[in-house]
Image (cartoon, grey):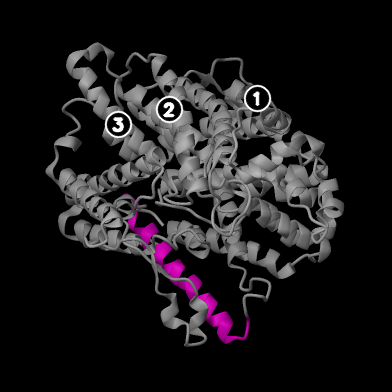
Amino acid sequence: MSSPQRFRARAALLGIVLIPVNSLWIARAEALDYSGFPTCMSLFYNVIFSLMILLLANALVRRFLPRQALTQQELLVVYGMLATGSSLVGHDYLQMLVPTIPHAAYFATPENNWDNTIRPLLPGWLTIRHVDDAVRNYERGFSTLYRWEHISIWLVPMAAWSVFLLAVIGATLSMCVLLRRHWVQNERLAYPIVQIPLLMTQEGSATPLFRNRLFWAGAALAAGIDALNGLQFFYPALPSIPVKIKDIGPLFAAHPPWNAIGWLPLSFYPFAIGLSFFMPTRLAFSGLFFYAARKGQQVATAAMGYHDTDAWFPYLREQAYGAWIALFAASLWFGRRYIRELVRATAARGSAGDGGLSYRGVLALFAGCVLTMTVFLIAAGMKPWLGVTYVVLYILFCGAAARVRAELGPPAHEMGWVGTSYMMVMALGTAAVGPKSLALFSMLHFQNRMHRGLLMPQQAESLKAASESGLKIRIMALCLGLAGVIGILAAFWALIHLSYGRHYAASGHPGALGSAFAGEHFQQLSSWLSSPVKPSRAGLNAVLIGGAAALLLARASTIFWGFPFHPVGYALGTAFGLDYIWMPIFISWVIKVVTLRYGGLKGYRTMIPFFVGLVLGEFFVGGLWSFLRGILGVQTYTFYI
């Protein structure tokens, strides 16, 4: 841990300034251009790119005005704030919520009958109910946000949703603070992802990263690939090095039941190879094994005569959800001694806390935010018992993601349609949920669809960075909370601004930015209302089986020395978490196993700079292409997906 340093408020001000810039960048790349997708990976490349630019500028400042240079602690505060803002505007969060607000009113037609079936179910204070020129200009573009009639229609739903979003931010941040000491000091979790910004920002002779030849070799390799591919985008006569995904599933298309393998992407992303090197070898192997097992289940069920229309048998998503929830619940159970101590410290009159924060105050914040989330959903029309259940399960799911990132650090954790709302509908049926609650579940689609850029893992990693650098937890937590407020405002602004001002719409997706995703869940709602879904005992059993399998794997890991199967590998591999990156994980796993076998721990540590170089080299050049695309308004090479 670094020694304490003086923290200056200008770092927080710098974060406030950079959050809207990054929000606009992400909204342009992901929602408008539908390319690059910085928030679809664990480590956001726009944040790392911004941090690298700050490091370059800081080097100049240190040379001429050394006392004015940013310290590691201040740089990490900026990193945490940008990660927070990026998560909020991300592909799986506000990009899906914002277009939901006017969607049902604008796209209601006599054919779909939404005026009579859906719109009466939606709370007026969470949506825009009347279609006028302001709504039409938003959906069609070729206009501007900066007219009062355009701004005014958004004020009430923005304010209402901001209350809910701030409660979510407060709940997850306070839970991170409450669990931080246990994860960092008692369990000594590795936090693999945050090691990269820590290495980037370390000061003094103790950190030779930028003077390491292996680092520059890795950076040159990754940057060279992206530079060449970027130039080839403009000059097709140049050669290129294919590293992006290529679907090899069609090779099996003519051979049933093997054609049930479906989509089988092959990729060689340098950044994913670099990040995977930080993963424990057992997790990497387990993820690959269970990814193959998932494909095997698809082939086996096809051979048995099942098809995609057979209620998603063998319930892979349900298995993954059960594993995800069970693993976090188990971690809380095994940490029950710490939790009891936490409760006693909270009840005591002393000043027990963490990093300048009182446990009593943090626990009160957590309880208040959870209560606010629940009351919000009930006030919007959700049945009270459903509101309580949804909030509890959603918080557990976020906690599971943060725990997995803190312990194992997968490069991505995409889990398609493995969401609390869908699991509740599957288990209870639409009749028990009821039309109003179903409508709210549809509006909460942004919290349940893919889970790629979840905020709580970013918060947990930022607090770990604070403790490693000697920064008080209180300062980082306050800055992350401030970033949440600014991030919500910046996300709404960037997405609405671009929708009004865009000069084209994505091919095949009429409407505002993200309108296709809004349509996705309203179509689902329409289907639920017209064709009620019965409770699925088989699906619920699959959730229980997934949870039991994960717990058995966890138990076996503690009993049998060298047991190769990690339960998180089951949770990730059974869902959609590894599809894009299974080959980079395999490549990195092979290299790491060979390195440890013949070079030991010393050889592994020697190789770390090379793999950090792969990440930073690709993120810098690939991020530069993406940033130029937004600035110049021209199509450029996108290195991811």
Q: Residues within 10 Å of mark 1 (few under 14, many from 20)?
A: some
The one of 623 and 471 positioned closer to us in this rendering: 623
* Contact, mark 3 vs mark 2 (Cβ under 8 Å): no
SS category of the residue bearing label 3: helix
In which quadrant is the N terminus drawn? Answer: top left
The mark lying in front, picked from 3 and 1, is 3
Q: Is residue 178 above or below residue 140?
A: above
Magenta span covers which residues?
A: 278-306
Q: Amino acid at mark 1?
A: Ala
Query: What residue sits right under mark 2 in the picture?
Result: 18
**Crowd tier of the residue under label 3, counting other residues whose Cα lies within 10 Å: few below 14, some 14–19, many 20 or above:** few
Give the distance between the C-alpha atoms of the residues marked 3 and 2, in whole angstroms. 12 Å
Name the quadrant containing residue 582: bottom left
Q: Main secondary structure of the magenta part?
A: helix
Residue 563 seen: no
Q: Position of residue 39 (x, y in %)?
A: 46, 45
Could you tell which of marks 3 and 2 lies nearer the N-terminus? 2
Residues at circles 2 and 1 in contact by the CB criterion of under 8 Å: no
Determine the CA span between mark 2 and mark 1: 31 Å
Q: Which residue is mark 3?
A: 53
| Label 2 CA crowd tier, 10 Å (few <14, some 14–19, many 20+) | some
Q: CA distance from mark 3 to mark 1?
A: 39 Å
**Which of disc 1 and disc 3 is earlier in sequence?**
3
- Looking at the image, is mark 2 or mark 1 nearer the viewer? 2
Quarter of image, res 138? top right
Which quadrant would the C terminus be assigned to in this image?
bottom left
Q: Which mark is residue 364?
A: 1
* Identity of the residue drawn at 23% across and 62% down: 237
